[in-house]
Amino acid sequence: MTDSKSNKTLTLKKKPDAVEGDSEQRRKRSGSRARQVAQLERERAKQPAAPARQQSTPEPSSGRRHAGTDTRYGPAQSSGAMRGHEQPSQQPPRVSRGGRREHPRATDIEVFAVFAPCPHGLEAALASELQALGFDDAQADRAGCRFHADWDGILRANLYSRLATRILVQVAQAPVRQEDDILDLAQNTPWERWFGAEQTLRVDTSAIRSPMQSLQYCNLRAKDGICDRLRDHEGARPDIDTVRPDARVHLFLDETSATLYLDTSGESLFKRGWRLDKGEAPLRENLAAGLLALSGWDPSSALLDPFCGSGTILIEAAWIALGVPSGIWRPFGFERLRNHDARHWRDIKEEARSHIATQLDSPLVGYDLNPQALEAARANLERARLTPDAIRFEQGDARTVPPPADTGWLVTNPPYGERMPDDASLWADWSQNLKRNYSGWSVNVISSDLDLPSQMRLKPLRRYPIHNGALDCRLFSFEMVEAGYRNK
């Protein structure tokens, strides 16, 4: 999966164009899609054919490819940037093959309220990212951000956001006092426009200061309401699949109300599709991208991780520097929903690929004492479609390794908590190396040990509260100044 040319750091393979053939030669469908097609065929046999209306499908400007373009940050700057408040184009109602009116596509007519959850501590960074992507009204909220977008913008938020965990579309909200109010809310929501009885379903529930006694029972009430609605409208209830469902719904409860969200992401967005070897202490990809954002790393500058482990921070950095959208090579939940426009989605991804650069300008270097961790990092590097020389992974001790450039950024996730080393002198020795050799560098360290700066005998310029999973951590930022340290 790597490019044989020495000056390339990213491999791009274009899929062959689909060959149109007779209906007998087309790929046979299976699974939920087969059930959906079978249902349409049954309706077609029952009802007389209706004259199809002429449909107008304007070509989206964001789907055009620009020949010869090598813009590193094209997705955020090009004409294809997400705009959450564009005036939707009006199209006539669609008619199915059986003469039945289809539900109008959300991309044509609606703007939705959206909530994008993220790790605690990244809310402001996520809001800045979403605003840079074109969502001007993005605002930080508790453990996430809120913004508005049309359906096209929702697709692009999934594709481009590096910090969000999911993209949740609000489909219903109402005051609730008891569990049966949740049942009524779910029953009165038009789920049939998004998914049907032939597809599988999963419902998740979360709450903040909700008076409800049992979240499990609230989850059951929401699930029953959805299934009852589809049974009444389509004659059958969907099957429940908690592992790989076709549709995911999130119920959120607060003190007075319930909100139902349609999950358009499917698997969590931090799952980029390249990390299988997680190492001893895995750092989720969106948290790694968040550390880079909070540190202020300049993608044109050198980056060092002296405790690199499986390479998550550095691989995220490489994708950022090359302009690779975080979701470019993974599937999404919205691809399984009804009325998904696969052709338009393909055009969006093709436009995104056209802006990916193929060569890094500055060195990305990772050190670790564990050779197995370095093997995992190199395997992840290959799965991320980066060439072996894109990131330099070497065995080395943070207390002695030299900087790869005169100036740059150091962003790292060193051992802490259960991974704390027995060597009590680690922090003092590492700090001495930083003071002597890293003047002009910005050093950024995440740790759950709030006394780390005093152990390193360094005063942090900034400290950001952040959660690494269940651990309450801080990202400490130090500026290594020659006049401040070398003479001591």
Image: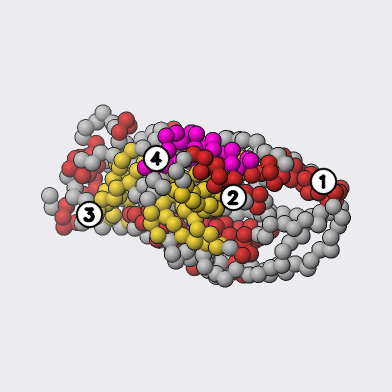
Q: Which residue is mark 2?
A: 189
Secondary structure at numbered mark 1: helix
Q: Amino acid at mark 1?
A: Arg
Q: Which residue is mark 3?
A: 461
Image vertical order of residue 156 relative to residue 66, above or below: above
Residue at image coords 43%, 61%: 138
Q: 10 Å neighbourhood of mark 2: few (<14), some, or many (≥20)?
A: some
Q: Whole-percent x and y of residue 222? A: 54, 41
Q: 10 Å neighbourhood of mark 3: few (<14), some, or many (≥20)?
A: few
Q: 10 Å neighbourhood of mark 4: few (<14), some, or many (≥20)?
A: some
Q: Which residue is mark 4?
A: 211
Disc 3 versus disc 2: nearer the observer: 2
Q: Amino acid at mark 3?
A: Leu
- Which segment did they paint magenta? 202-228
Separation (CA) of disc 4 from disc 1: 46 Å
Image vertical order of residue 472 relative to residue 102, above or below: above
261 horizontally vs 366: left or right: right
Q: Report the front residue among 107 and 404.
A: 107
Separation (CA) of disc 3 from disc 2: 50 Å
